[in-house]
Amino acid sequence: MIPERLIIKNAHLVNEGKVTLADVLIENGRIKEISAANTLSIHTEEIRIIDASGKYLLPGVIDDQVHFREPGLTQKGDIYSESKAAIAGGTTSYMEMPNTVPNTLTQQLLEDKYQIAAKKSLANFSFFMGASNDNIEEVLKTDPRTVCGIKIFMGSSTGNMLVDNHQTLENIFSKCNMLIAVHCEDEATIRKNIELFKFKYGEDVPIENHPLIRSEEACYKSSSLAVELAKKFNTRLHVLHISTAKEIGLFDNTVPLKEKRITAEVCIHHLWFSDLDYITKGTKIKWNPAVKTNKDREALFEALLNNKLDIIATDHAPHTLQEKNNSYFKAPSGGPLVQHSLNAMLEFYHNNKITIEKIVEKMCHAPADCFRIKERGYIRKGYWADLVLVDLSSSWKVDRSNILYKCGWSPFEGQVFHSKITHTFVNGNLVYENGKFNESIKGQRLMFNP
């Protein structure tokens, strides 16, 4: 099915550090023309015109870290449900993690996920190949042109995905010719802290001790090892969800992103919440790495603005409310975020903490540059038309009635946002318009320039 021809007229176009009034012509799924506002006209009835007056046109958000739970954990979420929530939130492309069931540790299991997404995903997609202590041969078969990267859990994970053998790490870092993304928390440090808190509290550890168990020390010890290995072998390394001020010193802001071999990201929850929120939010904000202190949160925001942290992501990881409403050790870590990530960052814009140009840089341009995604992440002639229209003066409240996650809840419940995503385009197809979805055309597999 061919996407319809469209003109988006008179939009405030946010792209490459500038905001300009512009018209955008979309043909065959791609951006055909970008012109000054109200100058683009096509003399045919076979084109749809969308008046974007007063609205802001952004490239679609690219989320490089999500857990959509399929296969094997679909009571929490699945590729259809979570990609639909992503689309409603302005995310047009995602990269999904390998700790599904079974773990994505072979090329066949990786390809199985692509087959599912081709049939079900409303957004564009890629899937990480997972690494374990004993699948190096499978890892090295991964095609860097069609797969976003290799994922290593250098900390707790499910199944066989904790890579804690130093020789295995050296093998992967020295032999892998594509980007390696790492979850960094030192398992030995965490186990020691668990024993200390169990001795004090038994099984009923108060949730506010989570950042003391999954501590700054655990994060830094692991992330510094990853950076050390990357420097030793000149590996392309991307450190996921930085959560502490101390770790920021591991990263560089003296060279452009496209020239960096070592990059890092921050997640929405580490920018929004602090350890003071455990009192009211409880296990709903239990993530790994943990939400830490206000001092850490402010340092992360500063590092985002000064380019030591390169990307904003979500680590979207839904669990059912029944699972989350448990005692500390029984409640799983993770929460749903992908529907609300852009809105959360736009709230920071309204509070004068970040510019809209910087939001676009960190959520759209930077993921495309870091992962070398082909023809996405920018509003450019010839690029795929992954676009989002935003009304910056439309307030709404997050509640159960408008949450699209399969798990049915959000850590943002009760939050009033002052911006609203009104239209989302994926490959030129208007997939979402003012609360209504067009599911006739599915997303595409992302391609990369290795």
Image (tube, helix red, strand yellow):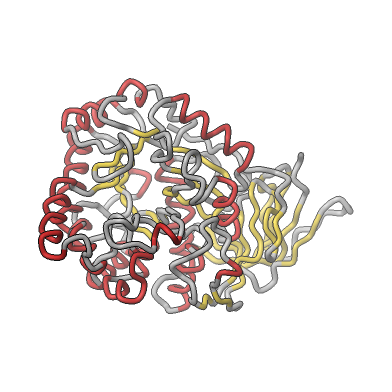
Q: Position of residue 247 (x, y in %)?
A: 20, 56
Q: Along the line of sight, which residue is nearer the eye, 3 or 162?
A: 162
Q: Along the line of sight, which residue is nearer the eye, 135 or 294?
A: 135
Query: In the rendered view, would you say 373 is above or below 39?
Result: above
Is residue 354 found left or right of 1 in the rendered image? left
Quadrant in which the N terminus is drawn = top right
Q: Residue at x 26, y 45 (%)?
A: 156
Q: Residue at x 15, y 59 (%)?
A: 198
Query: In the rendered view, would you say 2 is above or below 34?
Result: above
Q: Residue at x 16, y 55 (%)?
A: 194
Q: Position of residue 361 (x, y in %)?
A: 45, 58
Task: State the image quarter where residue 271 is shown.
Answer: bottom left
Is residue 184 found left or right of 367 in the rendered image? left
Query: In the rendered view, would you say 86 is above or below 126?
Result: below
Q: Position of residue 98 (x, y in %)?
A: 40, 38
Task: State the image quarter where residue 321 is shown.
Answer: bottom left
Q: Along the line of sight, which residue is nearer the eye, 308 or 185?
A: 185
Q: Position of residue 179 (x, y in %)?
A: 35, 36
Q: Along the line of sight, which residue is nearer the eye, 270 or 21?
A: 270
Quadrant in which the C terminus is drawn = top left
